[in-house]
Image (cartoon, grey):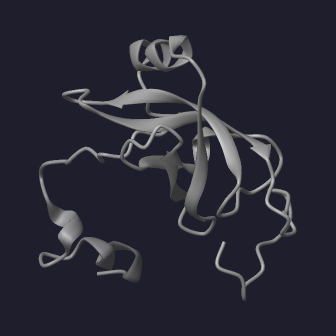
Amino acid sequence: MSSSSSTNTPDSPNRSLLQIPSPIVTRRTRTKSTTEIASNNPDVKGKVKYFCRTKGHGFITPDDGNADLFLHISDIEGEYVPLEGDEVTYRLCPIPPKREKYQATHVRIVNFTPEVHHRWDCKPNEDAHQ
């Protein structure tokens, strides 16, 4: 048995016959109908509560006081990595299968915090929690 095939050993968690879909809906995996729903929703305002560049996700606290919303890296528009406290606009996108919960899409930073913001094409600072 070669080392390249050792990733699918009998006791490997990857051996499952069923592929369980990820609950995270990215721009790449979003259906056309879900994308249209999000595109037709109005812009909403909020603030970045948390964003981790290395993990590729974070949360937005809506200005209207509703529950925090999930934010995926693929839904951020613009050239800068968001930081905690940045004011953003976004659109709500229903999360399948029941479409009862929402995540933020079309996210744009409209008011930057005073901290230095890095562009996406810059290497992340290993000491920072981005």
Q: Is residue 56 above or below residue 28?
A: below
In the rendered image, the quadrant that contains the N terminus is bottom left
Q: Is residue 95 above or below residue 36?
A: below
* Residue 99 shown left or right of residue 108 in the figure: left
Image quadrant assignment for residue 130: bottom right
Q: Nearest the camera: 51 or 85?
A: 85
Image quadrant assignment for residue 129: bottom right
Q: Nearest the camera: 59 or 127?
A: 59
Q: Residue at x 20, y 76 (%)?
A: 9
* Residue 58 shown left or right of residue 24 in the figure: right
Q: Is residue 15 above or below residue 90?
A: below
Q: Residue at x 19, y 75 (%)?
A: 12
- The image shows a total of numbered marks equal to 0
Q: Residue at x 71, y 82 (%)?
A: 128
Q: Is residue 48 above or below residue 62?
A: below
Image quadrant assignment for residue 25: top left
- Estimate the x, y position of residue 107 in percent, counting from the top left: 64, 37
- Estimate the x, y position of residue 10 in percent, counting from the top left: 12, 75
User: Please, which residue is most extreme toward the bottom here?
Assistant: 127
- Estimate the x, y position of residue 86 in percent, counting from the top left: 71, 54
* Residue 64 shown left or right of residue 53 in the figure: left
